[in-house]
Amino acid sequence: MSNKYERRLQRQFDSMVRRWPATGRVIGFLRRPVARLVRIPLGIVLVLGGILSFLPVLGVWMLPLGLLLLAIDLPFLQPPVTWSIVRGRRRWQNWSRTRRARRLAEAAAREARADATKADPRP
């Protein structure tokens, strides 16, 4: 069972590297087994920083990243973390797709109104 979630977690890391190539070296280092001594404290610090996101320097982005790092070493975190990441990504894609469609419809309506105004100038 854990193997399925471990593969899913690895796919999420691969997806992050594809989306943000500049993070590839850091993520590659953190995924190695020897980086466990860096990964666990960093994950804990990121989770705590995410919980304290109301402070100016810290942000909510730290919480999922910290949980993702901790899930590498703590198998019981893998199912909920991967589920949350996949679900969050789907919701983001749906929201951005809807927003893009709404913007295109508004732009088309604006253009149609502008064309109607040019075609029928009122005295």
Image: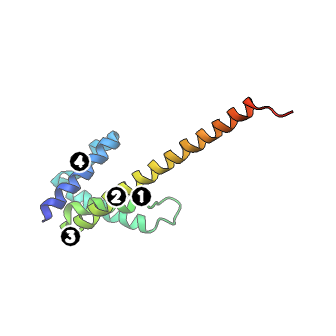
Residue in front for this viewpoint, 23 or 114: 114
Other residues around mark 3 within 10 Å, as few (<14) / some (14–19) / many (≥20): few
* 103 up-or-down from 81: above or below: above
The residue depicted at 26 percent of the width and 50 percent of the height is 13
**Which residue was labeled with disc 3?**
76
State yes or no: discs 3 and 4 in contact (Cβ < 8 Å). no
According to the image, label 2 marks what residue? 65
Asked if labels 2 and 3 touch by Cβ distance under 8 angstroms, the answer is no
In this rendering, position of residue 2 left or right of residue 46? left
Going by the numbered disc 1, the residue's amino acid type is Trp
Q: Are marks 1 and 3 in contact (CB under 8 Å)?
A: no
Query: For the residue labelled by badge 1, is the local secondary structure a helix, a strand or a loop?
Result: loop
Foreground tag (4 vs 1): 1
Q: Secondary structure at mark 2?
A: helix
Outermost residue to the top: 119
Q: Quadrant of residue 117?
A: top right
| In this rendering, position of residue 114 left or right of residue 54 | right
User: Residue 83 shows which numbered tag?
Assistant: none
The residue under label 1 is: 61
Q: Amino acid at mark 3?
A: Phe
Q: How is the image coloured?
A: rainbow
Q: Label 1, label 3: how many angstroms apart (C-alpha)?
A: 22 Å
Picture layout, residue 19 above or below residue 61: above
Quadrant in which the C terminus is drawn: top right
Residue shown at 73% from the left, 29% from the top: 119
What's the amino acid at mark 4? Answer: Phe
Q: Work out whether residue 113 or residue 5 is closer to the camera in this orientation and state it.
A: 113
Kindly state the secondary structure of the residue where label 4 is placed: helix
Classify residue 34 as left or right of residue 94: left
Q: Residue 77's quadrant in the figure? A: bottom left
Structural distance between the alpha carbons of marks 4 and 1: 20 Å
